[in-house]
Amino acid sequence: MSDKITDFDVKELLPQRPPFIMVDKLTYYDPLKSVTVFTVRANNLFCKDGVMEEAGLIENIAQTCAVKTGYRDMTEPERDGVVKIGFIGMIKRMDIYRNPRVDEQFTTTVEILEEVFNATLIGAKVEIGDELIATCEMKIYLTDKVPVNK
């Protein structure tokens, strides 16, 4: 893990803009794995009746992938330093054991299972403390497009 991670604002690593940011901080990075944290707030777009809906968990997992890619592209010398737009191509084996509630902080871990050209298959787990609350596999496609209003 690099000390540089704490120097990055996630907005520098993501194509998304507020209020659609579902990651607070990147806490771990290596070429195959990344870990983020996020605290659920009452005004979150995906909160209803004090609980984050499933779509919020899915978006958090996708954004954890995006933060990992953004960090890689910003810090590895052979990369161009430009954050690119990606999209979810597939969600497989999604299990949600419970949804996080307002003021709970959860940790999302994403590991690359396979990379082929612009497609990345990842395995993800979401935890609150030692409690596993969600898992899935997701395929993410990276485009050559960059955010317009970065």
Image (cartoon, rainbow, N blue to C red):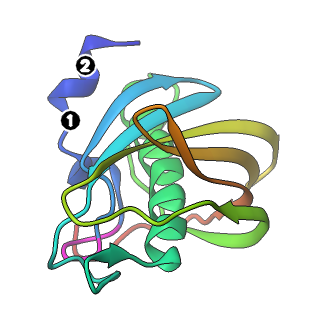
Residue drawn at (45%, 34%), measured in percent from left and top?
35
Q: Is 83 above or below relative to 81?
A: below
Q: Main secondary structure of the magenta part?
A: loop
SS of the residue under disc 1: loop
User: In the rendered structure, are the residues bearing label 1 and label 2 in contact, judged by CB atoms less than 8 Å apart?
Assistant: yes
Residue drawn at (36%, 35%), measured in percent from left and top?
74
Q: State left or right for residue 131 relative to residue 103.
A: right
Residue 11 image point, x, y percent: 22, 55
- Amino acid type, residue under disc 1 in the picture: Phe
- Nearest the viewer among 70 and 29 is 29
Residue drawn at (53%, 60%), measured in percent from left and top?
62
Magenta range: 16-20
Estimate how packed mark 2 is, as few (under 14), some (14 to 19) or many (20 or more) residues with alpha carbons within 10 Å: few
Which quadrant is home to the C terminus? bottom left
Q: Is residue 145 visible?
A: no
Q: Distance between the Cα atoms at labels 1 and 2?
A: 7 Å
Q: Is residue 64 visible?
A: yes
SS of the residue under disc 2: helix
Q: Quadrant of residue 123?
A: top right
Image mark for residue 8 = 1
Q: State left or right for residue 126 relative to residue 146.
A: right
Residue 132 image point, x, y percent: 57, 43
